[in-house]
Image (cartoon, rainbow, N blue to C red):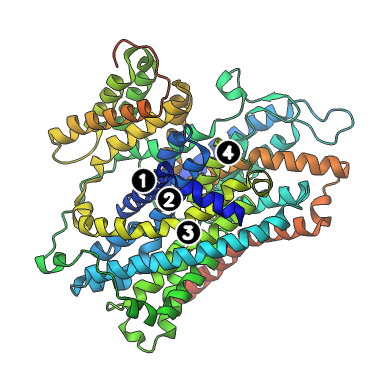
Amino acid sequence: MQTQSINDRVIGLVMALFSAIFLFMALKLPGAPPGFPVGSSTFPTMLGGLLLLLSLLLVVRRPVQATPGTAFWKVRIGLGMLATLAYIYTVMSVGIWVSTFLLLFVYALLLRRSKPTWLETLLLPLGSASLAYGLLVLLDVPMPESLLF
Amino acid sequence: MGGFLDAILTVMQPYNLLALVVGVALGSLFSAIPGLTSTLALALLLPLTYSLPTDTAFVIMIGLMGGGLYGGMLTAITLNIPGAPGSVATTFDGHPMFRNGQGGKAIGWATISSIIGGVISSIILAAGALQLAKVALSFGPPEMFALTIFGMAAVISLNTDLTKSALAGIFGLILGTVGIDAFGDFRFHFGVNDLAGGMPLLPAVVGLFALVKVFQAMNTSVDKPTISFSSAETADTRMRLPGVKSILKRWKTLLRGSLIGTFVGFLPGAGGNIAAFAAYNVEKRASRTPEKFGQGAEEGVIASESANNATPGGSLIPTLTLGIPGDQFAAVMIGGFIIHGLPVGPLLFRDHVDIIYVIFVTTFLMNFLFLPIGWVGSMMAVPLARLRDTLLIPIIAAFSLAGLFAIAGTTSNILIALIFAIIGLAADRFGFPPAPLILGLILSSIMEDAMNQSLTLSGGDYSIFITHPISACFLLAAILFVLLPLVFDKRKAKKQQATRGLS
């Protein structure tokens, strides 16, 4: 419960900072054109102000006991995201089917479980990637011209 | 009536019937497996429906909605683990029936009750929505603005931590201001071309509801405990339908459950689980043998499941006519309207009434698919329960990626989805709900346009939102929605303190 309240305060501060920057940017937007009471900046400015108020409320309020969620940052998750980034930048040149299979294979290796089997780590990603690829072909989605499939 | 006939012919086309079977089956499957939800299934399929005809896409979505409420009873009865929140009350008597060797009978009653609940509520939907839409079509900008505020308040009040829920909602509204606005100014797109037209909705949905599951499984997913059944218990899980006579004997329970479910579904913020609890309690009170409840009483299963499956008919009324979603699934489904270029709210009834009739007919027809799907499912209930969720992660990931490709054929959407997956991880870690964020993203431009138009009408006078009676009512309702839980929580805390002081 103690860590929860510290977390809430930190998150509140981060969000307050974000809303302050957003509010600053919103205020710099063009205001109401002549003859109009409202302009591009009206709505975002209100939202920014409201977000700032609520984030500060999160900082000062008494801690509320919350159910802990999944950890936000772990090496496995970081590796999974790096793999996804690598996928995003190579998929168009390598090909959807092959790179999707490789990415799913990496995901399967990163999953937490006791006794991984070949079926789970290799065949399932292969099958899922093939299914997804087949669906894209079936739906007639334009594919990039790539090295492999 | 012509509209209905056309819609029946449309839904009856082989292509659409297949889509309906796929939707209901997938919805049932996702809701039967604990940990997976029909909202996840919708997030996975929504991008893929982009390239389908609009009617087919909505047939699938409605099918997912119905199946998503039906399938949860399978694991509720066999394992005492509700696959979906709406089936919590089904465990009270469904699981004891299974333990008594009447698993197949319980599944049979759950199926019949689901069908009857769904059919009754779909009829109320068709009648109610068309009437309410007539009223809603007369709404001007102030009413529309108040309506969007009310919609946000309803979804924000779903979560117990209102501050965080409201923060998530406003963050969503802020994300919705990205891109070109009504005055032709570009805002907050930081020179990124993909954002100039606005924050794309689909990658946000896929990232927040689907891709996030993949990363979460890298940290917390552990093998499910192996569940053992004695042979006597597993012997009878094949669906056994009750006879017509016994169905007729239970007509009061069925009708009460269906009406309660439809009414609770209509209330924004209350979904299948509240409906099922309410119907269960009413039935227990009405029963001449209340002591049998909890020991395997058929009426318990009937009340819970008829109410649970009657909620779509109720919740689709505000979703379709006003653009106010009753729950998380409906919030994501409103995204489906936007993707297919349809307006959200009353204009749907003026400009695209054909799709409305397709939705009515689908909401009615889908219920009858529970029979074959339940029959197959009843034989798979035990193996399904043993399925490790790590097995499903590659499939979820593959469908997320395929869907993101299907939207535009580029990788920029995958990057946006990845960013939203990170937001989703942080939200889950720190206790922020994702549904208000998505609804904020959806309603942002509607809310802003309605506000700007109202203020232009009034010459900048904000009292226009209070002087228009309907608008004032919606705003008052919004305030009540957010404030009432606060008052109740305070009372509860006081009571708890009092009892603690006594002990």
Q: Earlier in the sequence, mark 4 or mark 1?
A: 1
Image location (x, y in percent) of residue B111: 34, 65
Mark 4 = which residue?
B338
In the image, which is nearer the foreground, mark 3 or mark 2?
3
Residues under labels 1 and 2: Cα distance? 8 Å
Q: Are marks 3 and 1 in contact (CB under 8 Å)?
A: no
Dot 2 lies on which element? helix
Residues under labels 3 and 4: Cα distance? 24 Å
Dot 1 lies on which element? helix
Among the 4 quarters of the image, the one containing residue A76? top left
Mark 3 = which residue?
B364
Circle 3: is it few (<14), some (14-19), or many (20+) Cα within 10 Å? many
Q: Disc 1: which chain?
A: B
Q: Disc 2: which chain?
A: B
Tag 4: amino acid: Ile
Image location (x, y in percent) of residue B61: 46, 46
The label number, if any, that marks residue B22 in the structure image: 1
Q: Are marks 1 and 2 in contact (CB under 8 Å)?
A: yes
Residues under labels 2 and 4: Cα distance? 19 Å
Picture layout, residue B334 above or below residue A117 = below
Q: Earlier in the sequence, mark 1 or mark 2?
A: 1
Q: Earlier in the sequence, mark 2 or mark 4?
A: 2
The label number, if any, that marks residue B114 in the structure image: none
- Residue shown at the point (52%, 66%) measured from the top left: B262
Q: Earlier in the sequence, mark 3 or mark 4?
A: 4
Tag 3: amino acid: Phe
The answer to whether tags 3 and 2 share a subunit is: yes
Tag 1: amino acid: Val
Mark 2 = which residue?
B63
- Residue shown at the point (72%, 24%) measured from the top left: B185
